[in-house]
Amino acid sequence: MTTRSPETTPAVEATKTSVDVSVLVPARDEAENLPVFLDLCAEAFRDRRERYEVIVIDDGSRDDTPRVLTQAEARHPFVRVVRHRSSRGIADALRSGYLAARADVLVFYPADLQFKPEDIPRLVAPVLAGDADIVTGRKEGKYEKAFISGVYNWLSRVLFQVPVRDLNNVKAYRREIMDAQPVRPDWHRYMIVLAAAQGFTIREVPIPLYPRAAGKSKFGLSRIPIGVLDMLAVWFELRFSRKPLLAFGILGASMFAVAAIGGVLVLTIGLGTRPLWAVIQTCLTLGSVFFATGILGEQVAALRSEQRELRRRLDETVSASRREQ
């Protein structure tokens, strides 16, 4: 049975019928940080008018995190726990938290105490006020990966024309933004990019960054090439997912054009060398492959369009059912 600690007030107690903000906290091996983090949440939310719940997603922790969270649930009524048997990554953790969340406004916040819970109300304020659909924090303070983050953000601005300086940070956003997110590993980093492409309004607010209190970062250099490839995948998704033949058709036509030029040279000038014939044959083969890939892509795009329409109708049915209740 859940007990209420003496210092917890009703303002932070989330009820099943009234939750304004769901804070999603992915955590893997954060046993040292979580007690402090949740105590700070209780302090930050105590005098707020809006009601909060904190959903901690234990992403396959191997340390003492499960026991710590069991104690936290008993100590803080606003805490709820979702557990993964094995580590599935932040994107899946946020998805699990979103499915468990009861509020229409969601917040992504890490448990490592590099961002303090006292800044959560400031992060969600524009969303609650209706001034923005998604609010992202902009790091203020010393950041060990500032160079890598700066390159990533610069490339993202160049490719996607998003008017914010820090894409991969704490965020507050409306639930419908998560409804439209593709279920892809690591694509949570491009939530702002995808939301902007769908017409949602974005705001950026400064959020202080603090040194990690305990534990170690889950980010390594191996994530850099993965991040670059994900960035290209998102760019292709936004540019050509609805018309893949446009991309592959241009490539195929370019290959056929090179082959045609080579054929003209062979017939008119008599440059019948073996390398030139090899180029012509290669271009014809690649052009055919690109066109075939584009045609298959069009079939997949048609199926995705049908899936989106079915999902839209399902969402409308669920919304109508909720209104009737």
Image (cartoon, helix red, strand yellow):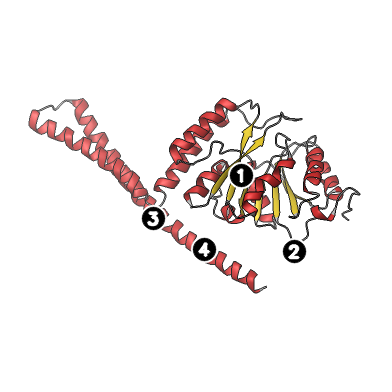
Instruction: Please give the residue where the numbered disc 2 appears in the rendered image.
Output: 17
Whether residue 186 is visible, yes or no, is: yes
Q: Where is residue 65 in the image (x, y as percent from the top left)?
A: 79, 40
Q: How far apart, in angstroms, are the residues tagged by discs 1 and 4?
A: 22 Å
Q: Name the residue: 60% across, 27% down.
A: 145
Q: Position of residue 312 (x, y in %)?
A: 52, 63
Q: Do the residues labelled 4 and 2 touch (CB within 8 Å)?
A: no
Residue 82 tag number: none
Residue reaching furthest bottom? Answer: 324
Q: Name the residue: 45% across, 61% down.
A: 306
Residues 307 and 236: in front is: 236
Q: How far apart, in angstroms, are the residues tagged by discs 3 and 1?
A: 28 Å
- Which of pointers 1 and 2 lies earlier in the amino acid sequence? 2
**Label 4 sits on what residue type?**
Arg
Residue reaching furthest left? Answer: 268
User: Which tag is nearer the camera, tag 1 or tag 2?
Assistant: 2
Q: Are marks 3 and 4 in contact (CB under 8 Å)?
A: no
Residue 312 tag number: 4
Residue 299 tag number: 3
Residue 259: image quadrant is top left
Q: How far apart, in angstroms, are the residues tagged by discs 3 and 4?
A: 20 Å
Instruction: Please give the residue where the numbered disc 1 appears in the rendered image.
Output: 91
Q: Position of residue 281 (x, y in %)?
A: 23, 35
Q: Are marks 1 and 2 in contact (CB under 8 Å)?
A: no
- Which of pointers 3 and 2 lies earlier in the amino acid sequence? 2
Residue 168 to residue 74: above or below = above
Q: How far apart, in angstroms, are the residues tagged by discs 4 and 2?
A: 25 Å
User: Which tag is nearer the camera, tag 3 or tag 2?
Assistant: 2
**Label 3 sits on what residue type?**
Gln
User: Which tag is nearer the camera, tag 3 or tag 4?
Assistant: 4
Dot 2: within a 10 Å radius of its alpha carbon, few (fewer than 14), some, or many (20 or more) residues? few
- Which of pointers 1 and 4 lies earlier in the amino acid sequence? 1
